[in-house]
Image (cartoon, rainbow, N blue to C red):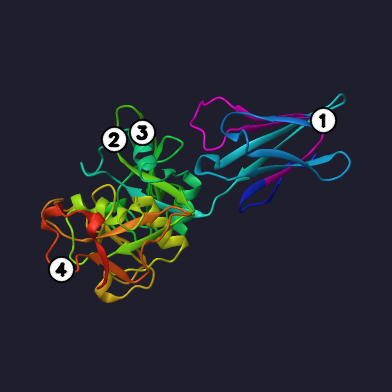
């Protein structure tokens, strides 16, 4: 019996001998979480449960063999799965890991650093179009150069942080304290172990994958306060982008813009693919200005347009009033806007 991933992209594919087949998830599970059966098959009959209903199906690959296809893969599908086949003579099981291409990003809310319990960290990532990252994903991000000197929750309930450039305030210059990253002068992933998830508070490391839609920077005729960001995007058939959406657009769609803009959580950030001195340093990444004063600071805005949503104006146009004037504190009616080159 083979239970191996054969393809990823629009869906994930596993193969298994026909008999009684169970596909159960322990994927990305917390410690102690029960295994959940997602697909049950008997001969050529099969049934998918829960969120897999309508997305999972069996395809015959020849006598005594079948492929289980999972379509419309989501962030919640990430992790390890167990494939079990039972017949009259013997049982067989196998494990398969569903990986997603994506990006890990550190996150803390407006309230400041080290404010999140484990449950609050899960919620914060979900609100920014992500999930808590796994330890494997954080380690891979560290190998790609992620350097962040603040500890955050991971999906398994542990607290860790990646250091690519060792320094004393971030776990020292190497040695045993470097945890899972190897503990050398090249840094590592510092590991606090499993923490009390209802009492202790840290930041979060979130993971997000490819976007079905598009993130773009909107430069109104004049910069807007945060209260005007949603109306500015709505006039373009879009919503204010979430932090995870901006990170995904930077990493996977190569969005590069040396201009800060509002995001949905009230932060101001900008993505840099090609580093230059005037745009925040020599390394690529998503630069953050933190959480500026929402009423006094003025920026453009990063918007997210879902698939199929119409674009009211050609790319490269801004929005404003042909008769002049400013935003006036966000009191203007966006329905009266006309596209203007800026």
For the point 11% across and 65% down, the residue is 325
Q: Residues within 10 Å of mark 3 (few under 14, many from 20)?
A: many
Q: Tell me the distance, in whole angstroms, between the alpha carbons under discs 1 and 4.
A: 71 Å
Q: Tell me the distance, in whole angstroms, between the alpha carbons under discs 3 and 4.
A: 51 Å
| Front: mark 2 or 4 | 4
Question: Horizontal and vertical percent for residue 236?
Answer: 33, 58
Question: Which disc, if any, is residue 323?
Answer: 4
Q: Which of marks 3 and 1 is nearer the N terminus?
A: 1
| Front: mark 1 or 4 | 4
Marks 2 & 3, CB-CB < 8 Å contact: no
Question: Horizontal and vertical percent for residue 101?
Answer: 53, 54
Q: How crowded is mark 4: few (under 14 residues within 10 Å), some or many (20 or more)?
A: few
Q: How crowded is mark 1: few (under 14 residues within 10 Å), some or many (20 or more)?
A: few
Answer yes or no: is residue 259 visible. no
| Front: mark 3 or 4 | 4
Q: Which of marks 2 and 4 is nearer the N terminus?
A: 2
Quadrant position of the N terminus in the picture: top right
For the point 44% across and 48% down, the residue is 207
Nearest the viewer among 124 and 236 is 236
Question: Horizontal and vertical percent for residue 16?
Answer: 77, 39
For disc 2, the marked residue is 201
Answer yes or no: is residue 122 visible. yes
Nearest the viewer among 158 and 242 is 242
Q: What is the magenta range? A: 13-41
Marks 3 & 4, CB-CB < 8 Å contact: no
For disc 1, the marked residue is 43
Q: Tell me the distance, in whole angstroms, between the alpha carbons under discs 2 and 3.
A: 7 Å
Q: How many marks?
A: 4
Q: Tell me the distance, in whole angstroms, between the alpha carbons under discs 1 and 2.
A: 49 Å
Q: Residues within 10 Å of mark 2 (few under 14, many from 20)?
A: many
Question: Which disc, if any, is residue 118?
Answer: 3
Marks 1 & 4, CB-CB < 8 Å contact: no
């Amino acid at each position: 019996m083979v239970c191996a991933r054969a393809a990823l992209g629009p869906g994930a594919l596993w193969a298994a001998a026909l008999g009684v087949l169970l596909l159960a998830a322990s994927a990305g599970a917390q410690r102690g979480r029960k295994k959940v059966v997602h697909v049950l098959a008997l001969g050529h009959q099969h049934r998918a449960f829960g969120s897999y209903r309508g997305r999972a199906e069996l395809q015959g690959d020849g006598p005594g063999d079948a492929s289980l296809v999972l379509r419309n893969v989501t962030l919640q599908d990430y992790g390890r799965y167990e494939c079990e086949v039972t017949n009259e003579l013997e049982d067989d099981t196998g494990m398969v890991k569903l990986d997603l291409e994506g990006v890990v990003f550190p996150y803390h809310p407006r309230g400041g650093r080290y404010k999140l319990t484990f449950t609050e960290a899960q919620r914060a990532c979900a609100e920014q179009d992500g999930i808590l990252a796994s330890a494997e994903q954080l380690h891979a991000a560290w190998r790609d150069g992620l350097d962040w000197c603040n500890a955050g929750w991971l999906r398994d309930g542990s607290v860790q942080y990646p250091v690519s450039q060792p320094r004393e305030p971030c776990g020292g210059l190497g040695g045993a304290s470097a945890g899972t990253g190897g503990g050398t002068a090249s840094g590592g992933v510092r590991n606090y172990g499993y923490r009390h998830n209802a009492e202790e508070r840290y930041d979060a490391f979130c993971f997000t994958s490819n976007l079905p839609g598009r993130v773009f920077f909107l430069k109104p005729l004049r910069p807007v306060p945060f209260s005007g960001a949603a109306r500015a995007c709505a006039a373009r058939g879009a919503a204010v982008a979430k932090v995870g959406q901006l990170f995904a657009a930077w990493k996977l769609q190569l969005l590069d813009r040396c201009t800060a803009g509002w995001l949905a959580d009230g932060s101001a950030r900008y993505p840099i693919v090609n580093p230059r001195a005037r745009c925040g340093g020599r390394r690529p990444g998503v630069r953050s200005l933190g959480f500026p004063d929402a009423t006094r600071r003025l920026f453009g805005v990063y918007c997210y347009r879902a698939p199929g949503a119409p674009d009211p104006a050609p790319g490269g146009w801004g929005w404003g009033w042909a008769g002049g004037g400013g935003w006036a504190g966000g009191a203007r009616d966006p329905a009266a806007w006309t596209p203007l080159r800026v």
